[in-house]
Amino acid sequence: MDPLTRLYPLPESSCCSFENYNLTTEWLLNQTNHRPKVAVICGSGLGLLADVATDKKIFRYQDIPNFPVSTVAGHEGCLVFGMIEDTPCVFMQGHFHLYEGYSLCQVTFPVRIFKLMGVETVLVTNASGGICPDFKVGDIMIMKDHINLPGFAGQHPLCGPNDERFGIRFPCMSDAYSKDLRRLTLDIVSELGCSNYVREGVYCMVSGPNFETIAEARMLRILGCDSVGMSTVPEVTVAKHCGLRVLGLSLITNKVSLDYSREEKVNHEEVLEISKMRTEVLQKLATMIITRCQQQSINTH
Ligand SMILES: O=P(O)(O)O[C@@H]1C[C@H](O)[C@@H](CO)O1
């Protein structure tokens, strides 16, 4: 038994051992010749980002040892290996959430698998509600920073024994989102002529599954949040901890109500509808980012 496990006997569902990560990594490496350099985590309704990849090899989450399964509509539950031009990639069609009942170790499990497989860059995507009054439905927000609200209450993926093989005990999080990748994205956005609906902003994670009350939304606005969602922050935290470069794109699928007189009520179907509407542009954006970020990474090594 590894000494950490002996020191800290953990309930089965709350933490994953290095052996679990290794087993899943080895299993995947034995099943495919793909050796991804970029991982794309697709949020609600955004699984179609994988459609543009070529030479695909697809695994259902339920068939991968130790992998959680998706339980939410708009999360297909497939791991897709494939090429974006010359770059080997892996796409998660659907990710995991606290509100599904998963521990944060389970939610972030795939990120460490990607690290062990040799991935260098992670592109995370999600759907979120716009809090910044300037944001419109259909805007794409480049994540500049985040607020880990569940983390404030101890729901943090790095709580528990730290495994130095992944990263240090007290990682810096002030630069979680790569400045180079954000700059690259802004350049591509201006080339594509879509600057009018791309913004930068701060994403706040709440646990969900209910959408915010008006008082909660007002509080988040005072705290400096530009959008609110129910995912991504755990994956980003774990990715940064183990030295991966991170870029986050959040699609604003609805405006969060800050006003008691507002009649519109948000629902998940609307979230999926807006995601579908923006699929094409997000596919184009992701393809260009992936191709060029690999060049950027080759040039800087
Ligand atoms: O992209 P994610 O999974 O963060 O999607 C948001 C949060 C909830 O899962 C769902 C609510 O409609 O959309």
Image (tube, rainbow, N blue to C red):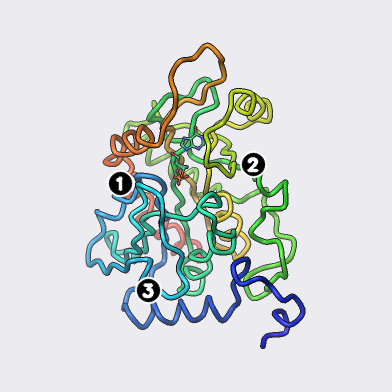
In the picture provided, is 6 more to the left or to the right than 32?
right
User: Which one is earlier in the sequence, the residue at label 3 or at label 1?
Assistant: 3
Residue for point 25% across, 54% down: 51
Work out how far the residue at label 3 is from the one at label 1, CA to CA, in angstroms. 21 Å
Q: Is the residue marked by circle 1 packed among few (<14), some (14-19), or many (20+) residues within 10 Å? A: some
User: Which one is earlier in the sequence, the residue at label 2 or at label 3?
Assistant: 3
In the picture provided, is 67 more to the left or to the right than 104?
left
Vertical order, 283 against 112 (above or below): above
The residue under label 1 is 283
Q: Nearer the viewer, mark 1 or mark 2?
A: 2
Tell me the element at label 3.
Answer: loop
Please, what is the three-letter code of the amino acid marked with disc 3? Arg
Work out how far the residue at label 2 is from the one at label 3, CA to CA, in angstroms. 32 Å
User: Which one is earlier in the sequence, the residue at label 1 or at label 2?
Assistant: 2
Return the residue nearer the eye: 100 or 296.
Answer: 100
In the picture provided, is 139 more to the left or to the right than 242?
left
Vertical order, 142 against 136 (above or below): below
The residue under label 3 is 35
Which image quadrant is residue 282 in?
A: top left
Please, what is the three-letter code of the amino acid marked with disc 2? Ile
In the picture provided, is 17 more to the left or to the right than 116?
right
Mark carried by residue 147:
2
Residue for point 40% across, 26% down: 137
**On the rendered image, what quadrant is the N terminus found in?**
bottom right
